[in-house]
């Protein structure tokens, strides 16, 4: 029998990285509207817009300031949080991108992209995963990308990191499925966020992208809420190691 409570997040606590804008903000508000207390993780104390949107839906939140590019310090920041909260849902959303031809790609930029997009994802999953394993329950949702499947142009670090996120998702899922933890990923298509502003501003590139998307439009951050809510809820208890593509049909062309 189908039960609408399968999608309820009442009594759950979710930690969302990169919660200030875009996809992270939309998912944070969506989970809060379903009853979750959301821990908003950002690298600066500038989460006021996200907080306001959560208040508008009657949700509950707390904020956590962690610079995910400083991977050496992540554990020391996250462990006190685990002393105060049992985290049921981890959304590894934070990500950065650097565009530059591969032959000239800046090494420091490469390391920052890998640190934020991959190393921080593993460290947070490991630290929070330990708590989930002890409790025998949990949901980890990584934000992948279409570049988990494709190579892109001028974004070698981003493509490498997102391919790795997809592989990490499967690896953790294999280890933790028997411990009551589901690890999955969402691969957004071309979404209107800060990271895509440069290519949306390029008239030729923008038109070529729109021509390939069957729905004929860029995605909006809110288009990711349903996928995140499903993977965060009991409705997905038998879904593990999957990357759910939300792209308006791009990958189907």
Image (cartoon, rainbow, N blue to C red):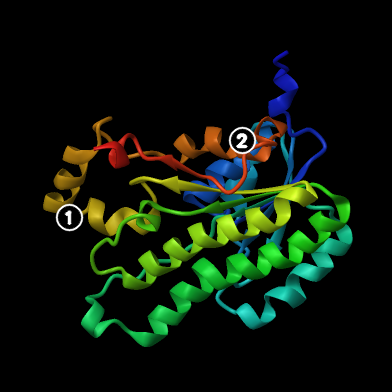
Q: Residue 142: x percent and y percent? A: 56, 54
Q: CA distance from mark 2 to mark 1?
A: 33 Å
Q: Secondary structure at mark 1?
A: loop
Nearer the observer, 71 or 237: 237
Residue 69 in the figure: left or right of residue 220: right
Q: Residue 148: x percent and y percent? A: 40, 57
Residue 208 in the figure: left or right of residue 251: left
Question: How many residues crowd mark 2 within 10 Å: few (<14), some (14–19), many (20+)?
Answer: many
Question: How many residues crowd mark 1 within 10 Å: few (<14), some (14–19), many (20+)?
Answer: few
Judge whether 184 appears above or below 232 on screen. below
Nearer the observer, 98 or 145: 145
Whether residue 133 appears in this view of the structure is yes
Q: Residue 214: x percent and y percent? A: 25, 32
Nearer the observer, 139 or 49: 139
Q: Residue at x 87, y 57 (%)?
A: 134
Q: Residue at x 62, y 39 (%)?
A: 239
Which of the 4 quarters of the picture holds residue 133? bottom right
Classify the position of the C terminus by image quarter. Answer: top left
**Residue 94 has which mark?**
none
**Residue 229 has which mark?**
2
Whether residue 65 appears in this view of the structure is no
Classify the position of the N terminus by image quarter. Answer: top right
Q: Which residue is mark 1?
A: 202
């Amino acid at each position: 029998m189908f039960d609408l409570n399968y999608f309820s997040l009442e009594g759950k606590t979710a930690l969302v990285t990169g919660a200030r804008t875009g996809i992270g903000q939309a998912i944070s508000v969506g989970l809060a509207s379903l009853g979750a207390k959301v821990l908003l993780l950002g690298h600066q104390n500038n989460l006021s817009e996200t907080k306001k949107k959560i208040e508008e839906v009657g949700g509950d939140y707390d904020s956590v300031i962690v610079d995910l590019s400083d991977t050496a310090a992540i554990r020391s920041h996250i462990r006190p949080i685990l002393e105060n909260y049992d985290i049921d849902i981890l959304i590894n959303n934070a990500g950065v991108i650097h565009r530059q031809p591969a032959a000239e790609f800046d090494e420091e930029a490469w390391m920052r992209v890998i640190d934020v997009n991959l190393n921080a994802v593993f460290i947070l999953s490991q630290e929070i995963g330990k708590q989930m394993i002890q409790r025998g329950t949990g949901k980890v949702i990584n934000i992948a990308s279409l570049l988990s499947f494709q190579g892109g142009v001028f974004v070698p670090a981003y493509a490498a990191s997102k391919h790795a996120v997809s592989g990490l998702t499967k690896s953790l899922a294999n280890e933790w499925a028997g411990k009551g933890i589901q690890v999955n990923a969402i691969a957004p298509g071309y979404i209107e966020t800060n990271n895509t502003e440069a290519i949306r501003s390029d008239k030729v590139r923008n038109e070529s992208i729109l021509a390939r998307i069957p729905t004929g439009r860029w995605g909006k951050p809110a288009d990711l809420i349903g996928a995140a809510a499903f993977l965060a809820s009991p409705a997905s208890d038998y879904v593990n190691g999957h990357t759910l593509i939300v792209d308006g049909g791009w990958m189907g062309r």
